Amino acid sequence: MKPVWRRLQPGFAAALLVAVAQAFAAAPASPLWMLMGRHGECAEIAVLERKIPHLGEIRDPAAFAQRMRARGRDVVTMEMPGGAVEVTVPGEGLALVFVPADRCRRAGAH
């Protein structure tokens, strides 16, 4: 007996392949978020582990704010120009600016 993909009509298989490819292409990719430093340099979000132990994996500003609220901290978020998001956690002494990776330059870049 032929495998299922071999039993499909050639036109149907091609249409299915095109539909799947379009679905993946149309899905917006979530941006890679970084922390912006004072002079425009970027740092991985993981550097926050130094200040906040057991932070876990944080991929974006909303996840960071949610994690801090879950720990009972007051959190203020503010959208900024250029897609940046400022997250302030007064109880931790933090005022962070999250930016999509393409919006800041890499550390050491001129």
Image (tube, rainbow, N blue to C red):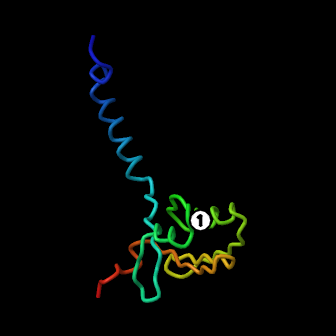
Q: Position of residue 45 (x, y in %)?
A: 47, 69
The local secondary structure at tag 1 comes to helix
Q: The C terminus lies in which quarter of the figure?
A: bottom left
Residue 31 falls in which quadrant of the image? bottom left
Q: Residue at x 58, y 65 (%)?
A: 64
Q: Is residue 102 above or below residue 41?
A: above
Q: How many marks?
A: 1
Residue 5, compared with residue 90, is above or below; it is above
Is 12 drawn above or below residue 20 in the view shown? above
Q: Position of residue 85 (x, y in %)?
A: 56, 75
Q: Is residue 52 left or right of residue 101?
A: right
Instruction: Please name whichever residue, 24 or 50, is drawn nearer the observer in this view of the structure.
Output: 50
Task: Name the image quarter holding the N terminus.
Answer: top left
Image location (x, y in percent) of residue 73: 70, 69
Based on the displayed image, in which of its 4 quarters is residue 101 positioned? bottom left
How far from the left and from the top, in percent, is residue 67? 63, 62
At 42% across and 85% down in the image, what residue appears? 40
Under mark 1, the amino acid is Ala
Q: Is residue 60 left or right of residue 90?
A: left
Name the residue that disc number 1 marks.
62
Residue neighbourhood size for the residue with mark 1, other residues' Cα within 10 Å, grouped as few (<14), some (14–19), many (≥20): some
- Residue drawn at x 27%, y 27% as measured from the top left: 10
Residue plotted at (68% across, 79% down): 90
